[in-house]
């Protein structure tokens, strides 16, 4: 039995307290706020806030992935911190949607967005595969790799265990195969939309609206619509089975987030880390301010709702004051 304990060097820009707090708050807090807005105040405000949260999560996930890949190339990332990156990316995702809704949905925008999504997902899978294939000698402290543990359902598992690594690699292989299959099925639809736009330029204006064709591209990029379309596409209040399904979906997502958070915190506690890991760095401050940006969005949603309510009340009072005046004028004219 080794008498010395391998201390994992600090890297707070990857798994520091500020990074984790920002991600946890965005995942759980953003989901809960979006749920309550969708149930009690459906409409454009709820949709814009949800897009803001998704955009913040996606950008933070992309930044974390790029940081991990860069540090891996420079041999500055330990196996423990690489595991933390993979775990945090499971929370963040790589859904790089635009925060705003812009008109003009065409092939350039579509293909650019699809290419970014494919590259990001491919980089994530490649990083995962490289991590678990080279786990015994991965990173800047290969001597600490045998002592690095990963907590799964409360059980500490050695990160270099062959069985554990093979299970993860098999899961990644199945996920990659599923992604390729889905993209292959979508490719004819993408090509058909492009060919149709080349033959009939006017049809390109309706791409993504679902009116002419079976391809609906709002999953990729959200576009702005006309005034009539906005009135017809107003989100209705959820009730009955729709409300139950939406609630169960959000509850399942929150449950998954809670499990991932608890598992990561247990993994951090059960590994021997340098005390400087708890220090605050510039990257963590940026992550917190990114969280404040989402809080600012929520504040604007609340204030806009209050302003509309005050405006409606003022309009109702003016209408009440105008009606008696108009009725008295009409009576005077009749007497004359």
Image (cartoon, rainbow, N blue to C red):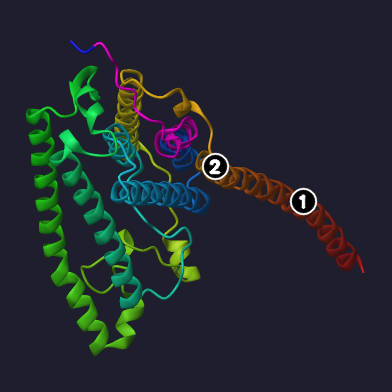
Q: Quadrant of residue 4?
A: top left
Residue at the (57%, 42%) spot, across then down: 292
Secondary element at image label 2: helix
Residue 305 shown left or right of residue 133 in the figure? right
Q: Indicate yes or no whether the magenta region holds residue 83.
A: no
Secondary element at image label 1: helix
Residue at the right extreme of this rendering: 336
Tell me the residue that label 2 is attached to: 282
Earlier in the chain: of badge 2 and badge 1, it is: 2
Q: CA distance from mark 2 to mark 1?
A: 57 Å
Residue 76 shown left or right of residue 290 in the figure? left
Viewer-nearest residue: 161 or 51: 161
Tell me the residue that label 1 is attached to: 320
Give the extent of the magenta segment: 3-23
Residue 263 shown left or right of residue 60 in the figure? left
In the image, residue 312 above or below residue 156: below
**10 Å neighbourhood of mark 2: few (<14), some, or many (≥20)?**
few
Counting from the top left corner in percent of width and height, residue 2 is at 21, 13
In the image, residue 13 above or below residue 323: above
Viewer-nearest residue: 11 or 210: 11
**10 Å neighbourhood of mark 1: few (<14), some, or many (≥20)?**
few
The quadrant of the picture occupied by the C terminus is bottom right
Viewer-nearest residue: 268 or 184: 268
Residue at the (31%, 87%) spot, across then down: 201
């Amino acid at each position: 039995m080794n008498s010395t304990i391998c201390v994992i060097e600090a890297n707070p820009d990857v798994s520091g307290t500020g990074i984790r707090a920002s991600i946890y708050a965005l995942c759980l807090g953003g989901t809960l706020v979006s749920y309550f807005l969708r149930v009690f105040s459906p409409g454009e405000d709820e949709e814009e806030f949800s897009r803001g949260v998704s955009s913040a999560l996606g950008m933070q996930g992309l930044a974390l992935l790029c940081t991990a890949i860069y540090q891996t190339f420079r041999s500055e990332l330990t196996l423990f911190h690489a595991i933390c990156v993979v775990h945090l990316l499971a929370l963040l995702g790589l859904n790089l949607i635009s925060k705003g809704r812009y008109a003009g949905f065409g092939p350039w925008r579509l293909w650019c967005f699809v290419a970014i999504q494919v590259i990001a997902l491919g980089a994530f899978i490649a990083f995962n595969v490289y991590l678990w294939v080279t786990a015994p000698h991965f990173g800047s402290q290969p001597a600490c790799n045998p002592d690095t543990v990963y907590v799964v359902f409360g059980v500490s598992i050695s990160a270099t265990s062959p069985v554990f690594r093979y299970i993860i690699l098999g899961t990644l292989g199945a996920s990659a195969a599923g992604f390729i299959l889905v993209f292959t099925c979508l490719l004819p639809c993408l090509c058909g939309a492009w060919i149709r736009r080349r033959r009939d330029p006017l049809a390109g204006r309706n791409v993504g609206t679902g009116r002419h064709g079976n391809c609906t591209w709002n999953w990729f990029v959200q576009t702005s619509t006309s005034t009539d379309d906005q009135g017809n596409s107003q989100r209705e209040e959820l009730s009955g089975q729709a409300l139950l399904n939406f609630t169960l979906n959000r509850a399942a997502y929150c449950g998954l987030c809670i499990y991932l958070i608890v598992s990561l915190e247990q993994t951090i506690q059960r590994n021997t880390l340098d005390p400087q890991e708890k220090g605050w760095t510039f990257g963590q401050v940026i992550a917190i301010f990114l969280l404040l940006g989402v809080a600012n969005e929520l504040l604007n949603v609340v204030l806009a709702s209050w302003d509309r309510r005050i405006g409606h009340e003022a309009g109702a009072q003016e209408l009440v004051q105008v009606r008696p005046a108009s009725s008295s004028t009409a009576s005077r004219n009749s007497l004359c």
